[in-house]
Amino acid sequence: MTPPPAAPSPANTIYMDDMGELIAGIPSMIGFPPQDSLVLMTFHVGERIQLGATMRMDLPDQEQAPDLVAQLCLTAVANEAEVAVPVVIGGSADPPELPYRWLMDLVVQELDDVDIPIVHAIWVPEIEFGETWWCYVDEECTGQVRDPQCSALAALHAYAGLVRYASRAEMASHLIPDREDRVAHVAQLVAAQAEQRADMTPAEKWAEVSAAIDATAESVPELVDEQVARLAEALSDPLVRDNCLPLPLTNRADTAERLWTALIRAVPAPERASPAILLAIHAYLRGEGVLANMAVEVALDADPDLDLARLVREALDRGLPPTVLRSMIEESVSSAEQIITAEAER
């Protein structure tokens, strides 16, 4: 299941009255055009209905569906949803006969059990401009999907610098390791760096990482193996890694994320876990649950004992809002900042 993104901030609130427009915005909310999926869009009720968290899961089989749908609805509760629009994407139909009606009936019942009413219950074959959507509840409720490339949500996310991928596979391709021989060479260099840099303080290592982040301001960095090894060794220090946690909330977020992505591809295990979990936190805090899931799996595969990765994995599994994750990491951030600052002032 794809965990929920953050609800839009008050300054970036978009109100949706057009269901075709709302469906067209789903790829921007998820990060790619979902196929064969159940998407649950949630809303908060104020003067008007305001978009909240959005969750996605693969279409389940009938045996697995009850547990997965229950988890989906509990995630909606955790994100304080007040109303919802479930959307089934995939299959073919001969309206008014719609596919996956059994699944939608299950979703509606689970939402009712947690006191979240639905506004619509929608089926659409795919999210493409001009495709016809239909409502499971009202046979006369139907319309066309607006252009996903030009939706209001796509415009907002583009303005915010969020990347939309053509598919989930394209998103995953950005985390694939570099050539095996290069990663093996970096592994040798990391081992050598651990001995050579044994006397370096966390403050000195953090300064090196900080400089590398600033160097990525314009584009994806071209890192030589020796620099990759130094950065990998620095980020393996828990204090340095924890000092990177606030970066998603600063104007250095984009540059730091470019560096983490480059390092994920070039760094061997177990050191690969550090840039991977940092990328996961960036993605989680800005609401890109799919990318966060992918990155945390990379981190745990590289180092199953990394406590920070386990923490993020638990938050993802429980569908916790990004604000909760932020509060969970504040203590370690504060501790790391105090120690590094004290060392730098000596």
Image: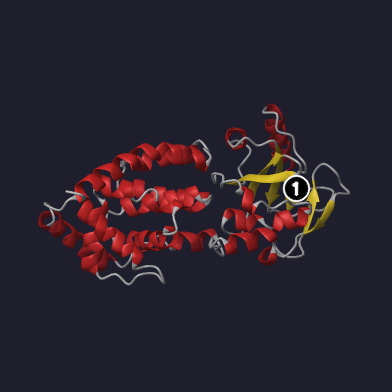
Of residues 313 and 63, the one nearer the viewer is 313
Of residues 88 and 45, the one nearer the viewer is 45
Residue extending farthest to the right is 140
- In the rendered image, residue 5, in percent from the top left (x then y), is placed at 56, 47
User: Which of the 4 image quarters holds residue 176?
Assistant: bottom left
The N terminus: image quadrant:
top right
Q: Is residue 93 visible?
A: no
Q: Residue at x 76, y 57 (%)?
A: 20
- Helix, strand or loop at disc 1? strand
Of residues 180 and 85, the one nearer the viewer is 85
Amino acid under label 1?
Answer: Ile
Name the colour scheme. Answer: secondary structure
Mark 1 is surrounded, within 10 Å at the Cα level, by few (under 14), some (14 to 19) or many (20 or more) other residues, namely: many
Indicate left or right for 201 with 138 as reference: left
Q: Residue at x 46, y 48 (%)?
A: 293
- In the rendered image, residue 117, in percent from the top left (x then y), is placed at 74, 34
Indicate left or right for 154 with 173 as reference: right
Residue extending farthest to the front is 345
In the displayed structure, would residue 184 be above or below residue 338? below
Q: Which residue is mark 1?
A: 122
Q: Is residue 161 visible?
A: yes
- In the rendered image, residue 121, in percent from the top left (x then y), is placed at 76, 43
User: How many numbered circles are shown?
Assistant: 1
Q: Residue at x 43, y 48 (%)?
A: 281
In the displayed structure, would residue 166 be above or below residue 46? below
Of residues 159 and 148, the one nearer the viewer is 159
User: Which of the 4 image quarters holds residue 83?
Assistant: top right
- In the rendered image, residue 264, in percent from the top left (x then y), is placed at 34, 59
Indicate left or right for 201 with 266 as reference: left
Indicate left or right for 159 with 271 as reference: right
In the displayed structure, would residue 301 be above or below residue 229? above
Q: Residue at x 73, y 51 (%)?
A: 15
